[in-house]
């Protein structure tokens, strides 16, 4: 759900959201590109491959930046990836970030 007309204050609210990406997302540098894009936006969190062939992780940061990253995960990904579905859940407002940077979990 995207809200339009967010005030600057609301756009800066810190949120945390979990994600899982389905499609051709392993063996195509998806995690590396996700890490680079997240760092570019100033987000923190993590990304990892799953045994089911998906990529999952968590994003934390200002709401406006997290929304941008969610759109990137849904539509862009790495150049050789093919995204079928992007699931986001457990979204919540947080008071402080749980991580200091964005990590690729092995």
Image: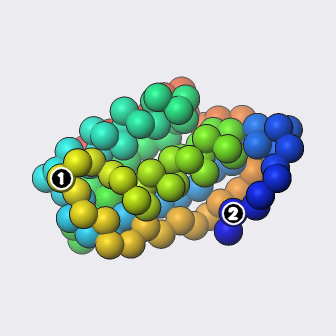
Quarter where residue 13 is shown = top right
Residue drawn 33% across and 51% down?
77
Look at the numbered disc 1 and give the secondary structure of its residue: loop
One can see residue 97 in this view? yes
* Residue 76 image offset from top left, x and y in percent: 36, 53
Q: Mark 2 — residue?
A: 2
State the residue lying farthest toward the left.
Answer: 27
Q: Is residue 57 left or right of residue 42?
A: left
User: Eyeballing the image, is 9 above or below 83?
Assistant: above
Residue placed under numbered mark 1 in the picture: 80
Picture coordinates of residue 81, whole percent (x, y): 22, 57
How far, Cα to Cα, is label 2 from label 1?
27 Å
Who's the residue at 65% across and 60% down the image? 91
Above or below: residue 74 compared with residue 31: below
Residue 67 picture location, percent across and down = 60, 51
Q: Is residue 58 visible?
A: no
């Amino acid at each position: 759900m995207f809200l339009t007309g967010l005030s600057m204050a609301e756009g800066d609210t810190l949120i945390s959201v979990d994600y899982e990406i389905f499609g051709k997302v392993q063996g195509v540098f998806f995690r590396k590109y996700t890490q680079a894009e997240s760092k570019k936006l100033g987000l923190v969190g993590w990304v990892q491959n799953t045994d089911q062939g998906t990529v999952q992780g968590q994003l934390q940061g200002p709401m406006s930046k997290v929304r941008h990253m969610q759109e990137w995960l849904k539509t862009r990904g790495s150049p050789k990836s093919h995204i079928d579905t992007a699931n986001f859940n457990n979204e919540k407002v947080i008071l402080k970030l749980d991580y200091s940077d964005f990590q690729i979990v092995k």
